[in-house]
Amino acid sequence: MTSLATWPYPLWVAHRGAGKLAPENTMSAFRLGAAHGYRMFECDAKLSKDGILFLLHDATLERTTNGHGIGGALTLGDIAQLDAGSWHSRAFAGEALPTLEALARWCLANRLFLNVEIKPTPGEEEATGRACGALMQRIWPQDIVQPLFTSFKPDALKGAKDVAPHIPRGLLVDKLAEGTGDADVQVALGLGCSAMVLNHALWNADLVAKVHGAGLRCSSYTVNDEWAAQRLIDLNTDGIITDRVDLFSPA
């Protein structure tokens, strides 16, 4: 488990590349986020039918592409032919869904930090985590800051841990079990996590103290208002994931 003293990541994280300024989880989005000065990026990764990790948030294709049905039911060849930009604006028409490897290699080339949310197709939680671990084990040098794996699915984090235990993990939580956070902290510790990434509204001073006291970092999604960001800064949290790369300066 990464200690509080050695947490290597910046405070500000660009959500799905550049938030809503570009089509999410596309290379254009990540390049735009970098142009706004962001050094760390969150993305969503799932497995194609032929076992290749690609970027897509939803289980289905309709919201962010011109495709239909379950994204993970397609081969990478079929995925590569999808238009993932026209839904956003004409300026991004024809934008492709990248593989996770393509994004990771771009981050490495530009010395950027990466937060991979393991977003499995239902039923493929552990397999997707294992694939993410195997990919980063293969391409990401161990002598530089590792990516951060996060997921709402404990089985996905377990799969990543089994294959690449040296890569830090964070448990995503949208609603606290029993309202106290104690059970969630225990799940995170059981998975050897370094962080808990919560819906930003859940954090309060007692919970931050509890999570920090357990040796874990406190991060938040998705923070798009100045008052909310300032509240999290005042609470001494460690990570802020935002769509508003045009509003918040990562410096």
Image (tube, rainbow, N blue to C red):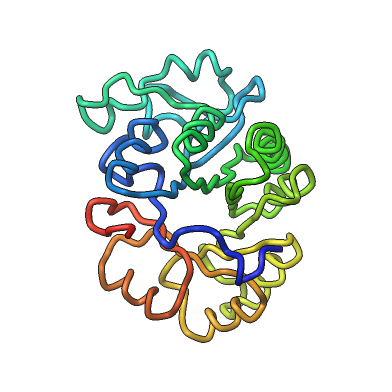
Left or right: residue 156 versus residue 163 is left
Which residue is pictured at 36% across the width and 26% down the height? 84
Residue furthest to the bottom in view is 206
Quadrant position of the N terminus in the picture = bottom right
Q: Nearer the viewer, residue 18 or 36?
A: 36
Q: Residue at x 39, y 32 (%)?
A: 26
Q: Position of residue 129 (x, y in %)?
A: 68, 42
Q: Residue furthest front?
A: 143
State whether residue 102 is above or below residue 8.
above
Q: Which residue is nearer to you in this view: 251 or 175?
A: 251
Residue 131 versus residue 236 in the image, above or below: above
Residue 189 percent coordinates (x, y): 72, 67
Q: Is residue 66 left or right of residue 219?
A: left
Between 167 and 22, which is closer to the camera in this rendering?
A: 167
The location of residue 94, given as percent across then percent down, is: 31, 19
Image quarter for residue 220? Answer: bottom left
Position in image of residue 185 (x %, y %): 66, 72
- Residue at (57, 64) in percent of width and height: 7
Q: Image point 44% across, 46% down: which residue? A: 41
Q: Quadrant of residue 160?
A: top right
**In the figure, 109 relative to 164: above or below?**
above
- In the picture, which quadrant includes the C terminus? bottom left
Tally the marks. 0
Picture quadrant where residue 152 is located: bottom right
Indicate whether 223 appears above or below 214: above
Q: Residue furthest right?
A: 162
Q: Left or right of 112: which side holds 49?
A: right
